[in-house]
Amino acid sequence: MNPEISVVIPVYGSAGILPNLVARLEETLIPAFGDGGFEVILVHDAGPDDAWSVIVQQAQARPWLRGLDLRRNAGQHNAIMAGLGIARGRYIVTMDDDLQHDPADIPRIVAKLREGADLCYAQFPEKQHALWKRLGSRFNDMVAARLLKKPKGLYLSPFRGFVRELGEEARRYNGPFVYLDGLLIQSTSHKRIATVTAQHHARGDGQSGYSFSKSISLWLQMATSFSIVPLRFVSLAGILASCIAFLLAIIVLWQKLHSPQVAVGWPSLIITILFMGGLQLLALGAIGEYTGRILLNINNRPQYIIGETANVDDAPES
């Protein structure tokens, strides 16, 4: 018999946190859903520590705890996709591994799904993140509102729950660049997206695995995988640059006609070259980003590669 709830957690650099995380999950999920009513899937994303051995140890006495060990680092969203491949629950919840998301909030998210929501996000009035991460989240929120047409004011938190049908729809995407929120939001209507307010806690131990470069990479996946707006932006920027260059030419011509002694040429030439050169590089960068993703899709780059497993008999293909 399949469990009602599947909790999928990508694991990276959190070996010291995992025993506490598993204990907190256990003390929350057993009273809420009963024995056999839930499962927890820990996906080890080839982190720098011995988190996989901790997962194996924790899973030995807990049949509801299942583990996947990825052979190479795939990224948070790709690791979640690997977990979705073996998730059996009617409702699926994803969360971080650092205890900044409280397992006690899981029943509240599931309650929203039982009431009829397809997708539910935890919203945090205050977040225990560095300033650059908070500013980056706000910028990402503004861009996502434009590109993904997400509901206004909805924070795309990694602490989310969704019905199995949305998970199966997301699994149909087989490209190497996964942005899970885009896959989920485009699979349901705004009326079926709910939220719960939760407290964001300080990280239990160690440092976040999300560096600035990884955050930029994830943002690019969102920006270029679900919209052609960046290409349209480049086109509009090219039109604007042409108009500005035309106006500059008129100004230079007017100055030359009214003041023949003015040495016209060098300043206007340098300004035009720098301006147009910058726009050309911007355009090439956007086109190159799309072209690179097309190439990797054609080459069938896998989303993840599964190595060892724990308490898993139905591991998906990589």
Image (cartoon, rainbow, N blue to C red):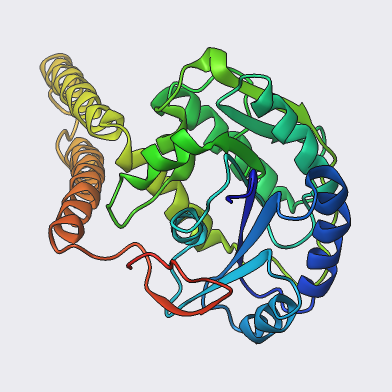
Q: Is residue 266 above or below residue 151?
A: below
Asked if residue 102 shows in the view, the reply is no
Q: Is residue 54 left or right of residue 165?
A: right
Asked if residue 305 shows in the view, the reply is yes
Rendered-image quadrant of the C terminus: bottom left
Q: Is residue 62 left or right of residue 147?
A: right
Q: From the viewer's side, name the closer residue of 142 and 41.
A: 41
Dividing the picture into quadrants, the one containing residue 141 is top right
Question: Residue at 29% of width from left, 65% of height from top?
Answer: 302
Q: Is residue 183 left or right of residue 247?
A: right
Q: Is residue 201 left or right of residue 263?
A: right
Q: From the top left corner, tell me how far across and down residue 250 is, in percent.
A: 14, 17
Q: From the top left corner, tell me how far across and down residue 114 is, in percent.
A: 67, 26
Dividing the picture into quadrants, the one containing residue 11 is bottom right
Q: From the viewer's side, name the closer residue of 232 and 76.
A: 76
Question: Residue at 71% of width from left, 81% of height from top?
Answer: 60
Q: From the viewer's side, name the closer residue of 150 and 246.
A: 150
Q: From the top left corner, tell me how far across and down residue 312 is, in percent.
A: 52, 71
Q: Is residue 255 above or below residue 317?
A: above
